[in-house]
Amino acid sequence: MQGIIDWITRVFWQDPAVCFRGAERFADYVGCVNGIIWSEALIYLCLGAGLFFSILTRFAQVRHFKEMLRLLFSNKESDQGISSFQALAVSLSGRVGTGNIAGVAAAIGFGGPSAVFWMWVVAFLGASTAYIESTLGQIYKEEDEGQYRGGPAYYIEKAMGQKWYAWIFAIVTIIAVGALLPGVQSNSIGNAAELAFGGESTVEFFGDTIPLAKMVAAIGVVAILGFIIFGGVKRIAHFTQIVVPFMALGYILIAIGVILYNFAELPRIFELIMKDIFTPMAGFGAAIGWGVKRGVYSNEAGQGTGPHAAAAAEVDHPAQQGLVQAFSVYVDTLFVCSATAFMILITQQYYVTDLSAEISGGMLASDISANSPAFTQLALESVMGAAGKIFVAIALFFFAFTTLLAYYYIAETNVAYIRRTIRFPGELIVLKLVLMTSVFYGTVRSADLAWAMGDIGVGLMAWLNIIGILILFFMGSPAIKALRDYEKQKNAGVAKYTFDPEALGIKNADFWKK
């Protein structure tokens, strides 16, 4: 019995005094908070919720794969809403970011090659979670000042009836995607620029010596970001629907080239990934922990970001956009993240912190930060020469930049939610300036601090959203009802799908009543 109590205590409660007592710098305190939020409990919650919803939907992420592909190319658009593909692009712009390049490197660097397997697991199971949250976003969306709005704050208030909980999510999300997470994306842009173009030339900035490459990258990113986000969601959607497919496909093709160049090594890489997935080395501090942590950071399934873009889509039935968003998790992790992982492992341009020499890579100097795009850049450099570093820097710019656009849109949606009750003069201007400041600061600061602060934002959102969608299942399971209704119409071969929430026993879905 005492052993069970000790296990529960270890999983669900991390004594902050133990960590904070030894903290000396701001980064130490951030690390303590990060460790508490990303305890084993959150790892269990992410995996458990994904498995739970996979069973409830009868593994819709597999059964409806063909339907997902069909729905991708729906071009239905209106003055209020964007098309399914545009919503997918906006969502993918949030999912496909620095986590796909630097995040995968960190998962391998801290968790070993087997962390890649757990990234695949969290993607496969997380696709069902993405369906649930995105369908909820569609069911409870509303029209606000000429455009569709929705997300966890909206469905928590309308379906759960707990406005205080919705407000907490909205405020946490604004802080997370408006201030904490942008620094992670821009930091990787700055680090990649420094690695690609050198850090010898420096400039003085408020008493700090900053590499010129980082400073130029910071100014450039902030200037372009400002131009787009001041143009509204339509400009964001049209930009991302062009850039996201192009950047993802180009990156995957380069990765395939690297793999084919080292094709004889491929069986050994699969063996390396699979050999430690269930061993003590794969514990929650290593492969499983880092695989799930970086998997959620990358594909965002359960984090609550995807429903914001899903709600903006113009569709005939909420389940349609839920299935499209489930597919976006596959694109992010099974395609793009796997491409990065195979490039790093097949070229052996990595090392693993605090794990056995047998799987540690050992090809690189230990002072190279795993929380950076260095592993990926060095992997491509080993095949393409100096052009490899430059290619990763360019790819990372597009990956991270489009994620910044998605972050702004998510933050704006939650400001719009709060604005229904309380209006502040110039609140969107303030949001834009805060985000742009965070981007500039993150570009020129250290990677470890940026990632730790970003992990806090991701973890808090995941806790609030996953608990919320689990509660909603027990309060009527509207997303499951929507899926069954859609499947019924699909099997009947209807010419045009319809959605009647009242007939399904779904309350407060006011948009669809019209």
Image (cartoon, helix red, strand yellow):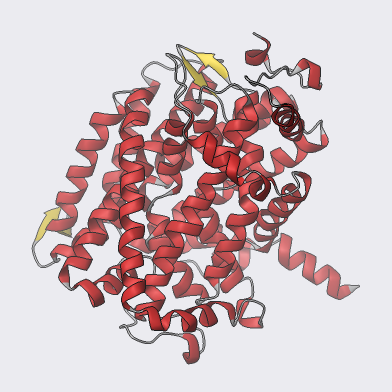
- Compared to residue 311, the image places residue 104 above or below, namely below
Left or right of 294, for residue 157: right
Residue 19 shows in the view: no
| Residue 512: percent from left, percent from top | 65, 15
| Residue 364: percent from left, percent from top | 32, 83
Tell me which residue sits at (56%, 34%) in the image.
307
- Compared to residue 214, the image places residue 224 above or below, namely above
Quarter occupied by the C terminus: top right
- Compare residues 431 and 311 and report the one nearer the observer: 311
- Compare residues 156 and 3 and report the one nearer the observer: 156
| Residue 421: percent from left, percent from top | 56, 15
| Residue 270: percent from left, percent from top | 52, 78
Outermost residue to the left: 201
Tell me which residue sits at (47%, 20%) in the image.
81
Tell me which residue sits at (40%, 42%) in the image.
93
- Compare residues 464 and 36 and report the one nearer the observer: 464
Quarter occupied by the N terminus: bottom right
Based on the displayed image, in which of its 4 quarters is residue 493 positioned? top right
Outermost residue to the top: 514
Q: How many marks?
A: 0
- Compared to residue 491, the image places residue 279 above or below, namely below
Based on the displayed image, in which of its 4 quarters is residue 449 positioned? bottom left
Tell me which residue sits at (31%, 29%) in the image.
229
Left or right of 114, for residue 283: right
Outermost residue to the bottom: 358
Residue 138 shows in the view: yes
